[in-house]
Amino acid sequence: MHAAAPPTETLTHKREDPAQAGVKRLTLSDFRSYATLDLALNARTIVLTGDNGAGKTNVLEALSLLTPGRGLRRAELGDCARNDGAGGFAVSVEIQTSLGGVQLGTGIEQNGAAAPSRRYRIDRESAPSIRAFCDHVRVVWLTPAMDGLFTGPAGDRRRFLDRLVLSIDADHGARVNALERALRGRNRLLEDRLGSSERIWLDAIEREVAELAIAVAAARFETVSKLSALISDARGEADSRFPFAELKLQGEIDSLIETRPALEAEDIYRRILRDNRGRDASAGRTLIGPQSSDLRVRHGVKQAEAAQTSTGEQKALLVGLILAQARLVKAMSGMAPLVLLDEIAAHFDPTRRAALYDLLAILGAQVWLTGADPSAFAGLEGKAQMLKVTPGRISAFN
């Protein structure tokens, strides 16, 4: 991680709650549109307003890199570096937690022709991986790109589901990646049309695939079960403007997990893999497994598939899911997560916006909101740190 340039500006705001946890300082160097940024924060709610393209989402993306995965844009690391910079970038935050303050930093160094290497630091000491950050911070988010979640392909819902799991189980990403590698290895062996004497290699890799697949599916099932229970418990207190969701995993592997012990499920799935080698070879991929599961979401009040409801109802349902995720993260980890809501108010009427802000206020988390229209945040004056974003710069909103 290259050294950050001297800060160009520092903004402060009156502390709202001395006991609250959250980001107290954010510094960026050569990240996206920011050459340098030094932002001091002392509010539970942070509002970023500015024109489209000013750099609001870039700030949220920087915060999303504090958690395992590729961030809210799922971008390649090199794409996060400022176009006119040296090729690397640095993100650093100072976070106040129940155990005191901690500094987390991540970024990449440009090593000539070599692929950029990502670095992690905790209190300015090297950390082995992003996994270590999970002891200090969790992050959940909602972006406009997720608006088509219920009507889009199943792959989008699987990624959404895995993000849900990852927010409470920091090892889930490693399991998913290992499963993808094992599946690719099986697919290559199937392409080679191995003879009977060489099938031992297929047997071995299918044992690995089965073990990883059941672990991934079990983690998803456990998360959906816990989230569904939390949503059910809160139904009596829920705001009707953000309807509750009913969740169910759909797929052959998910039915196995729901009805069979893990070891038995592994044996059954291994037989499925063996029996379907010919079909999978013809398809060029493994057809049955957690890589083909889907997350079924229903509008709980209307008892209708989410995909069949209106655009506004889908957005409200999605917001309700993200808020439930934040509550689950807090319950499971003991840490209220950072909640990043990009362009959240654009599709809501004033009544629903006010209801959302009330729900966020009782969430117990630091919430970051962005929007182009400052009037969408009416009612938050005096309760939030209001910031104006212009290209490469953030200033207090007047």
Image (cartoon, rainbow, N blue to C red):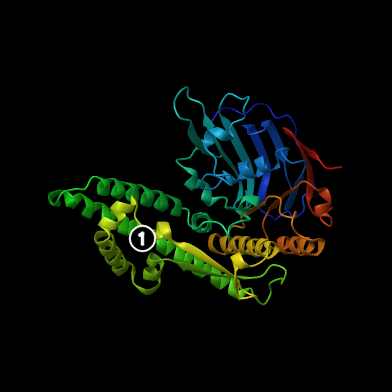
Left or right for 344, reference 188:
right
Mark 1: few/some/many CA within 10 Å (<14, 14-19, 20+): some
Q: Residue furthest top?
A: 112
Picture layout, residue 157 above or below residue 370: below
Q: Is residue 126 above or below residue 258?
A: above
Extreme bottom residue here? 236
Q: Secondary structure at mark 1?
A: loop
Residue 161 on image: x %, y %: 51, 59
Could you say which is closer to the camera, residue 1 or residue 33? 33
Front one among 273 and 372: 273
Residue name at image x 29 percent, y 69 percent: 264
Position above or below: 42 against 295: above
- Would you say residue 83 is visible in this rendering? yes
Horizontal side, residue 254 vs residue 317: left or right? left
Based on the displayed image, in which of its 4 quarters is residue 240 positioned?
Answer: bottom right
Q: Residue furthest toward the right?
A: 398
Q: How many marks?
A: 1
Q: Quadrant of the C terminus?
A: top right
Along the viewing direction, whichever of 278 and 231 lies nearer the viewer: 278
Q: Position of residue 108 (x, y in %)?
A: 52, 32
Determine whether, in the image, residue 288 is placed left or right of residue 230. left
State the image coordinates of residue 127 (x, y, percent, origin top left).
48, 40
Q: Amino acid at mark 1?
A: Ile
Q: In the figure, residue 150 lies in which quadrant?
A: bottom right
Q: Label 1, on which residue? A: 288
| Residue at the (38%, 68%) spot, across then down | 257
